């Protein structure tokens, strides 16, 4: 008798949960107030910006010389003007950063890795590239400049 009552109680609880769940997931019949946006995807030949950061850079002898650390955008044209190339070091320690003109790089598919890209540049351009120095004239947007307070 005790076993039958337990099975009956569990069955009723499961049925009640199923009814409650279906009542909560009913689709609304009200029209959506926001129109659906049209879908857009880049062409198959386009390269998304996330693929540039960390992209391997090779010289004209196909030797790895570093990777792209940053893209510098000209605010007046909205186009990439320069890249910061990280060279040497281990896990960012001891890495030397130099700046190259965007036009000096030739982006092409990586022959060794499918769906990857590589930047090619003449070794002479790397040898004559200036050292990169980060701007120090602006504070990060999340950290407003504040003056230290002094107590009287």
Image: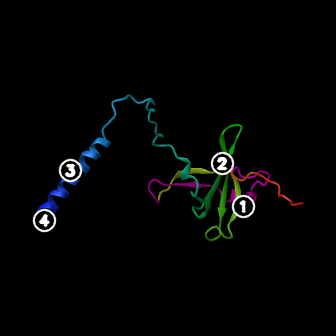
The alpha-carbon separation of the residues under discs 1 and 4 comes to: 84 Å
Q: Are marks 3 and 2 in contact (CB under 8 Å)?
A: no
From mark 2 to mark 1, how far is it between C-alphas?
16 Å
- Mark 3 or mark 2, earlier in chain: 3
Residue in front for this viewpoint, 6 or 134:
6
**Numbered range of the magenta stretch:** 112-141
In which quadrant is the C terminus drawn? Answer: bottom right
Q: Is residue 124 visible?
A: no
Q: Which residue is mark 4?
A: 3
Count neighbours of disc 2 (C-alpha within 10 A) and say few if under 14, some if 14 to 19, many if 20 or more: some
Judge depth for marks 3 and 2 and give the one in front: 3
Distance from Cα at disc 2 to Cα at disc 4? 77 Å
Per the model, the C-alpha gap separating discs 3 and 2 is 65 Å
Please name the predominant secondary structure of the magenta segment in the image.
loop
Q: Which residue lies under the disc numbered 3? A: 15
**Along the polypeptide, which appears first: circle 3 or circle 1?**
3
Cα distance in 3D space between marks 3 and 1: 75 Å
Residue 102 marker = 2
Closest to the observer, 6 or 91: 6
Q: Earlier in the sequence, mark 3 or mark 4?
A: 4
For marks 1 and 4 on the same chain, the one whose residue lies earlier in the sequence: 4
């Amino acid at each position: 008798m005790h076993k039958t009552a337990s099975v009956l109680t569990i069955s009723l609880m499961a049925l009640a949960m199923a009814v409650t769940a279906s009542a909560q997931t009913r689709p609304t019949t009200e029209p959506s107030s926001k129109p659906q946006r049209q879908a857009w995807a880049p062409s198959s030949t386009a390269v998304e910006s996330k693929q540039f950061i960390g992209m391997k850079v090779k010289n004209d002898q196909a030797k790895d010389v570093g990777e792209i650390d940053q893209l510098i955008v000209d605010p007046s044209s909205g186009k990439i003007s320069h890249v910061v190339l990280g060279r040497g070091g281990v896990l960012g320690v001891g890495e030397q950063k130099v700046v190259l003109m965007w036009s000096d790089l030739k982006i092409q598919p990586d022959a060794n890795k499918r769906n990857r890209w590589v930047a090619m540049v003449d070794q002479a351009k790397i040898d004559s590239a200036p050292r990169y120095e980060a701007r120090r004239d602006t504070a990060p947007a999340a950290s407003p400049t504040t003056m230290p307070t002094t107590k009287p």
